[in-house]
Image: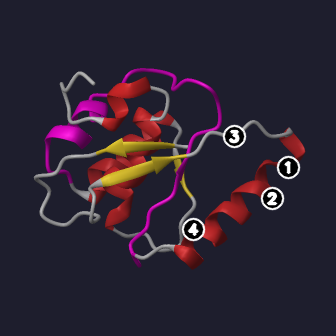
């Protein structure tokens, strides 16, 4: 699990302005079962009714995304984030279809394997 620091200047955000990334290694025949379990667990236990859950199947994204920087530096809208996710092969499995898809879900996937920089503000060297 990795916590991803998002843009603290966004007016509507989580309390600590972070997303969470979970990386799993799972047998191919158990992927769907795992995703259902994760979705149901998060939606049952999340504090927010707008929790977004994004999934990327693979180790590295097929290409770099400008949204990797944007989720930490700009105020984005849900439609553009969903379009970028679709372009990259990222899918949403939450049933909320809410604003949590913007940074918390898309941002978490984009920064999931970025190392220590993921936990800081954009440009901050930890």
Distance from the alpha carbon under mark 3 to that under mark 2? 13 Å
Q: Which mark is residue 103?
A: none
The residue tagged 4 is 42
Mark 1, secondary structure of its residue: helix
Within the image, what quadrant is residue 126 found in?
Answer: top left
Q: Earlier in the sequence, mark 4 or mark 3?
A: 3
The CA span between labels 1 and 3 is 11 Å
Give the residue at mark 3.
24
Say if 113 sits above or below 50 in the image: above
Q: Is residue 124 above or below residue 25?
A: above
Earlier sequence position, callout 4 versus callout 2 = 2
Q: Quadrant of the N terminus?
A: top right
Q: Secondary structure at mark 3?
A: loop
Lower sequence index among marks 4 and 1: 1
Q: Dot 1, crowdedness within 10 Å: few (<14), some or many (≥20)?
A: few
**Inter-mark Cα distance, 4 to 1:** 18 Å
Foreground label between 3 and 2: 3
* Mark 1 or mark 3, earlier in chain: 3
* Residue at left offset 42%, top offset 25%: 114
């Amino acid at each position: 699990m990795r916590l991803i620091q998002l843009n603290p200047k966004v007016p509507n955000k989580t309390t600590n302005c972070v997303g969470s990334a979970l990386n799993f290694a799972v047998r191919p025949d158990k992927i769907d079962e795992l995703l259902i379990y994760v979705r149901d667990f998060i939606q049952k236990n999340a504090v927010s009714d707008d929790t977004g859950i994004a999934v990327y199947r693979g180790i590295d994204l097929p290409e770099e995304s400008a949204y990797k920087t944007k989720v930490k530096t700009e105020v984005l809208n849900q439609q553009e984030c969903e379009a970028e996710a679709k372009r990259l092969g990222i899918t949403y499995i939450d049933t909320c279809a809410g604003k949590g898809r913007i940074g918390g879900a898309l941002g978490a996937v984009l920064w999931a394997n970025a190392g220590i920089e993921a936990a800081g503000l954009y440009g901050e060297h930890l």
